[in-house]
Each structure stands twice: as C-alpha cells, then as structure tokens.
Amino acid sequence: MPARIPQETLDEIMRSADILDIVGEYVSLQRKGRNYFGLCPFHDEDTPSFSVNPEKQFYKCFGCGEGGNVIGFLMKIENLTFPEAARRLAERYGITIPEEELSPAQLAAQQERQNLLAAHRETAEFYASQLPLSNIAQAYLKKRGIDQAMAQKFGLGYAPETDWQALTKHLTAKGYSEKLLIEGGLVSRSAKNGQCFDKFHGRLIFPIRDNRGIVIAFGGRALGDEQPKYLNSMNTPIYNKSAHLYALDLAANTIVKEKRIFIMEGYMDVLAAHQFGITNAVASLGTAFTDQQARLLNRLAPQPPEKLSVILAFDGDGAGAKAALASLTKLSTYDFLEPQVMVFPQKLDPDEFLRQYGMRGWQRLLDKYCYSRLDYLLLRTMERHDVNTASGKGDIVAELLPAIASTKTQTERESFIRKLARQLQVSDTAIYADLAKSGLLDGKKLTNHRPATKPQPKKETHQHPAQLQLLALAIGNQKIFDKAKAELADNFGVSDQERQLITLIESLGTEYDFHPNSLFNYLREENEGLRQFMLKLLETDITGEDPYVLADSCISIIKQQLVKDKIAQINRDISAAEANNEDCRELLKEKLRLSTLLIKKGEQ
C-alpha cells in the first residue's frame, strides 16, 4: 500500500471527480437555482436541507452542519480513510496512482495497528458472549436498572472469574501473539512463571469505542469488593484516554439534534442516562476534560451563531467537584455556550440520582441547579469558609480573585462582583480594591468603579463582510491572495479562523493550486470550526462581478474600517482622560488627523 498519494495525482482526482455524480448515487437530488437539494444521508429529516454545489464542488447540510468536498463525502458515507476514498475515486475515473511502497517500519506499524483493532473486536465479542452465562453480572445489571437491550447497545460483557486465561487462550487460538496482546493491554505476563493471564477477570466489561464505533479499549467494574473498583485499559498504539469520550458514537446524533451534551464521570452514569432517555450523555474517561476531547465536541457543534451547550454532570462528592472545576476552566476557553455544572444533592452521582428521583428530578436539577464556572466557584468556596465572620468573607474574596481577574469581559467581571458583594453583604467597592491590590490585573485595564461610567465595548473579532468577501476571493485566486497580504499585512484576516486558513495556505506553498474545495483535504478531523468556516466562504456569493475590482473595493473598505476602529479607540481614551482630568490634546490631534484621512477617502 502506498505511503501517500502524490499531490499531483490528488490534484488530478479532484479535477476529475464530479461531486454531483458521486453524491447522486446516495441521495436523490433536485435542482433549485445553482444548487441541488435532497434529504441528508447523515441525519434524519423530512425536509431536504442537504445541498450540493456543482460549480464549487462542495456539499453542505444546513440541518446537521456536515459539509466538505467529494473525498470528504465518500469518507463519511462509506466510513473510509482519506487514502481509501481517494483511491476509490481514482479507480472510478481511471486515474493511476503511483505505488510508493511503505518502508518496513511503516508496514510493521500499520500491520500492528490493524491486528490490535482486530484483537479488540474479538475481545469485545468474547466478553459479550460470556455475559449471559454470569448470574452475578446479570443480577448486578438488573439491580442497576439496565435492561438487556441497553446492555447490547453498549456491547457490555463479562470477564470470567475462575479462568484467568480464558481470553488469552481464546485469542491465541485465533492466531494472535502474546506479544501483541500485551502491547494492547489485553493480557499481562506473570513475573513469577512467565505465563500470560487476562487483564480483566470477574468484572463487568465496558467496551470503549471511538467516534466511529470501533472498539479500542475496555473498562472493567468489580462485582464484589475487589480493588480497584474500576480497572481500565492503559494507553496503547490505538488508544489514548485523553482523546476519546465514552459513548460518543452512540450520543452524537442526539448531541447534534439537541445542541447539548451531558458529560459524566462513569460508565454506569452514562448507561443510566441513556436508559432514562438522556441519549446525549458521554463520559470523560478521566478525572477532568482535555483539549483533545473539547476538539471532538467541536465537530458536533452547530453552525454559528448557535453554540453547543455543555453541561457537566459529575459526581456530587469532593473528587467530582474538583474535576468539575478543572473541566469548567478548560471548557470556558472554547467557543461553546458558557459551560455549566449540575449540582447533585447528598453527594449522589447521576446514576444514583436518576434511579432515586427519575426524569422529573433530573429536569428540576437542570432548571434550577446548573451553575456557571464563577457561580459554581462561589458555591464551593462559601461551603469551605464561614460567611458570618470578617475573616471568612476575606478568605472567600481572596480565593475568588484569580477567577474574577480571568473573566473575559468587563461586563462579566462587574456582574459577578456585584453578586459576590450581595452574597457576602459587603460593598463592591471593597472587592474592587482587593482586586486592584492583588496585582492580578497587571497589564489589564481595570476601570474605576463608578456606577455612572459606561462599560467599555468589547472589541469585535467576528468576520467583517469585506474581510469575508476578500478571503472568499483570495482562496481561489493567487494574485488576489498575494495583493491582500501585501496591502493589509497582519490585518488580512482578523478572526482566529481567518488567520488559521491564511496560515494553512501559506504553509502549503506551491502544493496548493488555489482550488478552494481541495483545502478540505488538509483540515484535520478535530478542526470542525475551520471546516465550517471554509463552507461559509464557499457559500459566499462573489459571482457576477470582476474579482479584481471587488477585491480592491474590499481592501479599501477594510483599510477605512481600521481607521474607524482607531478613532473609536481614541474616543474611549479621550473619555477616560477627561474623567481623570488628564491632558488629551495629543489624542485630539491624532483624532483630527485620522478623521481628515477618512474625509479624503470620501467618508463622512
């Protein structure tokens, strides 16, 4: 198998393949204007929202957000890898792909991965076959309210207690080497006699699957007093616990439909949630949420301006509270709705709560006991200190100051300070004073606390229409791309997504042929936000006008907007200077100079 498909061959595939022909084999399409529409093959719908643009060679579903080029469609619809999809298209259109053989090391690594996946599939099937034979496992599931259909849906199994080599013998009989099984964390070798024995025994088994539903690891729960209560697969060549979410493959459709996800700690919490109909629940496979897991969620996020709602449903004990705080901090750095945490009473976990209070209790928690990061911090901090003493109030404020300083906006900061002042029955002026003394805002602006002062407007970083049009032109025309870079420099692209795309194009160099739909081939799976932005660019209507005239107009508008932004900032600086009785003559001179510049450009 080739190590990679040469770029010139890939370009030929992209030029030859017609996305309308390929999609038409899976979806019944009808023409409406320049596009073709049909029912989306990736989610259930009654009204066609799936669109194909033959001119720009991309597809987009306005229901679930899926979109991309012809290779991406084939990958998604047939569950293929990128090379597999490209090769299928090459075969269809009579394109020969030069065979560049893998090195021995690459071949060995590829074969090991395939063997590990096959061994995990066999292991899941073996454990599932043992579940009906275990009375203790069946009794445990019945006690926890998990029915047979749910056990089958999650692929639950049982590792035999009496025979510690049951799986080892089963897999080696099928030709898998002990070395491979040890590498995959399925078995261990005894230091005493050198024999291999199963990693799991006497445990309920939870297969861990990737987002495509492929088994890559296992978790096992003791059914007696054995320790540890939960035993999990180690990281292997096919599994990294920080990069996966338990049950994401089962929850993805509901997450997309409801634009909400519940993140839990344990396997049984997720099973109980699904049993009660909360099918957008997953587990984090660790003590706190990670960047890799957040990027997985980005792929399921709705189209802007809508955002994904992320709710943490961690255990109500101390460890759960600590994990919730860490996860809230991590999630708050991503473009989701403000993440929240559900607070369970009596230190219950979600499984226990659902079995005790049912869906009515769950809905009540969701309505009244979901807290944002700052509110949750306040709740937990007040639990640890005496709010009736001056020293206790001082400790609470001191503990919360770093979180207050890290707020993204002045509005958020001031709102929380007012709430904190009310809770502690102190003045907000005192909290502002403590914040100023802390030094946590060094390098940041802290406006004097004056009720009559207007809040500073937040600098916008969304795509300006002219920026969007210019980039839509530039990704398909190298001359326009180069001109925009030369005239606007760092101001060509102001949002993170614009900068990422420009950086990607620059990094590709001559490898990019300025056919925009080919850019999808370079976007990593987890970068869903950038893929959606690419779709937005391709949807931008720039037809019917001279592209160079339109580009010049966009560049002129952007330059004028930059001047306006500078004037707006000067106006804010002048207001601040006047409030503090400071000299603002230099600021007024600069404002006059910039205003004159706008007038010369025809701006009033």
Image (cartoon, rainbow, N blue to C red):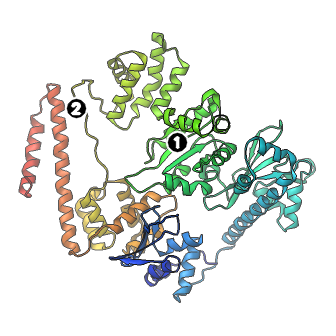
Residue 432, how many percent across, how many down? Answer: 34, 22
Residue in the picture at 63% in, 27% down: 346
Which residue is at the front of the view, 293 or 573? 293
Residue that badge 1 annotates: 311
The image quadrant of residue 2 is bottom right
Spatial distance from mark 2 to mark 1, Cα to Cα? 33 Å
Residue 332, how many percent across, how many down? Answer: 46, 41
The quarter of the picture where the N terminus appears is bottom right
Residue that badge 2 annotates: 454
As helix, strand or loop, the secondary structure at mark 1 comes to: strand
Circle 1 residues within 10 Å: few <14, some 14–19, many ≥20: many
Circles 2 and 1, Cβ within 8 Å, touching? The answer is no
Q: Tag 1: residue type?
A: Ile
Q: Which mark is residue 35?
A: none
- The vertical placement of 22 against 404, above or below, is below
Residue 12, how many percent across, how many down? Answer: 46, 83
Left or right: 92 in relation to 481? right
Which residue is most to the top?
389
Residue in the picture at 60% in, 58% down: 211
Q: Tag 2: residue type?
A: Lys
Circle 2 residues within 10 Å: few <14, some 14–19, many ≥20: few
Residue in the picture at 42% in, 61% down: 532
Mark 2 / mark 1, whichever is N-terminal? 1
As helix, strand or loop, the secondary structure at mark 2 comes to: loop
The image quadrant of residue 110 is bottom right
Residue 6, how many percent across, how many down? Answer: 52, 78
